Amino acid sequence: MAPMSVPRRALGVAVMRGRIYAVGGGNGDDDELASGEVYDPRTDTWTPIAPMRTARYGLVLAALNDKLYAFGGVNQSSIEAYDPEADEWAVVGEMPEQRWAMSVVTYDGAVYVVGGQTSAASLANDVLRYTPERAEWRRLRPLLPGGDGGRTYGAGVAVHGRSLYVVGGLKEGDALINIIRHYNLETVS
């Protein structure tokens, strides 16, 4: 597979229309990136896309309804949406607070943001639901405690059926978590 044009870490990655998008992150010199690129597996090529309006490190990226949504990043709370037809990013809203190192999934027309870091010393213990068509945030019930008060960042998340699974991650003090939390997305509010 062809390598990305720009090495990056703590980036956002999402799949849309059979292509893999890689945006933001850091370049290893503590520089935050706004640039992005898209990989086409049929041609094994990376192509640059328009840069985000804000450089972001530690963001998450979600694909929903033929758009990409970039959420947060270190000391960031804004949301940007990418239109691949226009090759253009637009600021479409704000998160309830600054957040990074969170996890993200989509389900039934909404984006779910799980955990993350909200300041240098504070971790989130909640699930946020963002509905783009209404530009609406809803804070859902806190993550189930598992000896960590529910506060976590860097967890893996997946949707299976109507269930959201939050797997592992880190808790306060950067201690690893080996538990799995489960939420029924129809009744989680």
Image: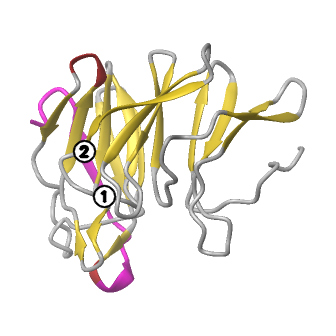
Q: Is residue 132 magenta?
A: no
Q: Quadrant of the C terminus?
A: top left
**Mark 2–mark 1 CB contact (< 8 Å):** yes
Q: Quadrant of residue 107?
A: top left
Judging from the image, the colouring scheme is: secondary structure
- The circle on residue 99 is 1
**Looking at the picture, how far across and down is residue 1, in whole percent?**
89, 44
Q: Residue flagged by tag 1: what amino acid is it?
A: Arg
Q: Residue flagged by tag 2: what amino acid is it?
A: Met
Which is more toward the observer, 181 or 108?
A: 108
For disc 1, the neighbor class at 10 Å (few under 14, some 14 to 19, many from 20) is many
Alpha carbon distance from label 2 to label 1: 8 Å
Which residue is painted at 37% across and 51% down in the image? Answer: 72
Which is more toward the observer, 37 or 31?
A: 31
**Looking at the picture, how far across and down is residue 186, in whole percent?**
17, 26
Q: Which stretch is magenta?
A: 173-189
Q: Quadrant of residue 136?
A: top left
Please state if 94 lies on the left or on the right of 161 as rendered: left
Q: Residue furthest front?
A: 53
**Looking at the picture, how far across and down is residue 34, in whole percent?**
58, 49
| Residue to which mark 2 is pinned | 95
The secondary structure type at the circle numbered 2 is: loop
